[in-house]
Amino acid sequence: MTGLILPPGQGKKIVTKAQEVTFKATAADGSSVSVFEVIVPPGFDVGAHVHDHSQEFFYVLEGTLDLLAFEPTERTGDSWHDWESPDGDRLVRAEKGSSMFVPPRTPHAFRNSTTEPVRMLFLNYPSPDHERYFEEIAEIFSAPSVDPGAVARMRERYDIEPITPLRYEPPLGA
């Protein structure tokens, strides 16, 4: 198989305690867009952030994610869950078939606030920025304890300007 056609479950897989990412189309394949299948575990919150240059697209394949993509009336630094836009927009409980497009400089976030894993398709432009990001974050998350400073430095290198913290707080018993 050439790698241009992938059967279900195939592709380079990166598994951490905070998420599972399968690479579907990459710069190595000649793609200008990185395409990933991502399993988001219960309790994972990517934190609100912006990109100066990157564009992203999220599509919920299974489960329900909380999604946000707007400039809030006030950027609070600890949590984005109660943000509201000047037009009254709030986070969306996005079920199977929902999508979110994020142009550059748009604050956005997602979290799995349910007790079940969520499966989503994630596209990022330009390739290979997020490919390298996922590889590097896997190294950081594999340490016995996660160094927040290492996460912050890595996110800065990959055009990720955090507004609220990335969190992974699995439900009790998970």
Image (cartoon, rainbow, N blue to C red):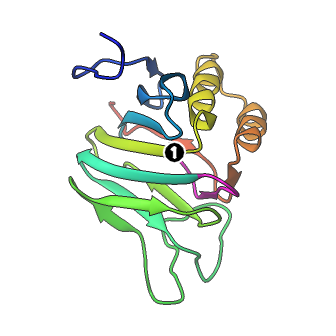
**Which residue in the rendered view is the most extreme toward the bottom?**
87
Nearest the camera: 155 or 25? 25
Asked if one can make out residue 44 in the rendered structure from this viewpoint, the answer is: no
In the image, residue 26 lies in the stretch drawn in magenta: no
Q: Position of residue 37 (x, y in %)?
A: 36, 34
- Between residue 48 and residue 115, name the one nearer to us: 48
Question: Residue 47, position in %: x, y?
Answer: 57, 52
- On screen, residue 90 above or below 111: below
Residue 50, magenta (yes or no): yes
In the rendered view, would you say 116 is above or below 67? above
Residue that appears at 65% across and 23% down: 140
Does dot 1 land on a helix, a strand or a loop? strand
Residue 45 location (% of width, % of height)? 49, 48
Nearest the viewer among 17 and 136 is 136
Q: Is residue 169 left or right of residue 150?
A: left
- Dominant SS of magenta comes to loop
Give the residue at mark 1. 124
The residue shown at (76%, 44%) is 156
Above or below for 57 versus 16:
below
Q: How many marks?
A: 1
Q: Which residues are magenta?
A: 44-54
* Drawn side of residue 27 relative to residue 66, left or right: right
> Hey, what amino acid is under mark 1?
Asn
| Residue 165 in view (yes/no) | yes
Image coordinates for residue 85, horizontal then vertical, percent: 52, 82
